[in-house]
Image: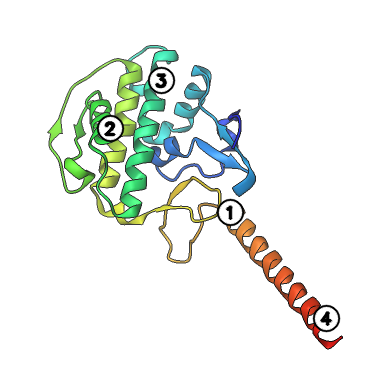
Amino acid sequence: MGTVERGAVGEMPVFGEHPALDLVNSTFVRGGLRGHPVDVLVEPSDLVVWVERQAEWLDPADAPAGELGAAELAAFLELRRALRAVLTAVVAGEPAGAADVAVVNAAVRAAPGWVELSPGAVGTGVRRSVAGERGAVLLGRVAQSAVELLTGDRRDLVRACPAPGCILFFLQRHARRSWCSASCGTRVRVARHSRRHAAEHAAGHAAGHTEE
């Protein structure tokens, strides 16, 4: 899809679903199937904005003092990669990879309190407790939210957007919701209309030639 473009947190098509999904959805495709990838977490300053936007979930003011620099950004991106792999497996009804689960569990151990994923990312886990540095604690809270999502009642609500070219996840809280966002739904409906119109035009053209 080409070079990844740096975007802004405010440009994310889907935000506020859940902290774990918001982290995974921080990279998306602008323009659908033939679009280009966008990443809103390219610089440490991007991570600072993302964390601030997650204040309701992460309580960043309660985290230990400290900067969010390159090392913290790298840790968040690695968790994002692992969570995308885990969520993809969950949506497909397959066991999550052990290496990806290990990344989530390693991150969650820095949270003030956490529950680790069991093998295969199913069932319940063991609760632990420890305190760490600011970046690690915030990372741990995101990972903890992922574990709670994947071991709780909302696990069955996790969906991957079926729109062509879309790589986002969402929680299907309403039965009528089929897409991650209204824009994806509109794009799919427009594409369907265009295909139907093209097919009708082709059929009419073929019929005209037959009559001749």
- Name the amino acid, label 2: Val
Q: Is residue 75 above or below residue 29?
A: above
User: Is 202 positioned to the left or the right of 23 in the image?
Assistant: right
Residue 156: x and y in percent read 31, 56
Q: Earlier in the sequence, mark 2 or mark 1?
A: 2
**Dividing the picture into quarters, in which one does residue 153 lie?**
bottom left
Badge 1 amino acid = Cys
Q: Which mark is residue 184?
A: 1
Q: Position of residue 101 (x, y in %)?
A: 25, 36
Q: Residue at x 39, y 14 (%)?
A: 71
Measure the alpha-carbon separation of dots 1 and 4.
Answer: 37 Å
- Quadrant assignment for the C terminus: bottom right
Q: Secondary structure at mark 1?
A: helix
Query: Which mark's residue is nearer the viewer, 1 or 4?
Result: 4
Q: Which residue is mark 2?
A: 104
Q: Which residue is mark 4?
A: 209
The x and y percentages for residue 113 are 20, 30
**Circle 3/circle 2 CB separation < 8 Å:** no
* Residue at position x 31%, y 38% in the image: 145
Residue sitting farthest toward the left = 126
Q: Earlier in the sequence, mark 2 or mark 4?
A: 2
Q: How many marks?
A: 4
Residue 194, x across and y down, in percent? 71, 65
Q: Earlier in the sequence, mark 3 or mark 4?
A: 3
Q: Secondary structure at mark 4?
A: helix
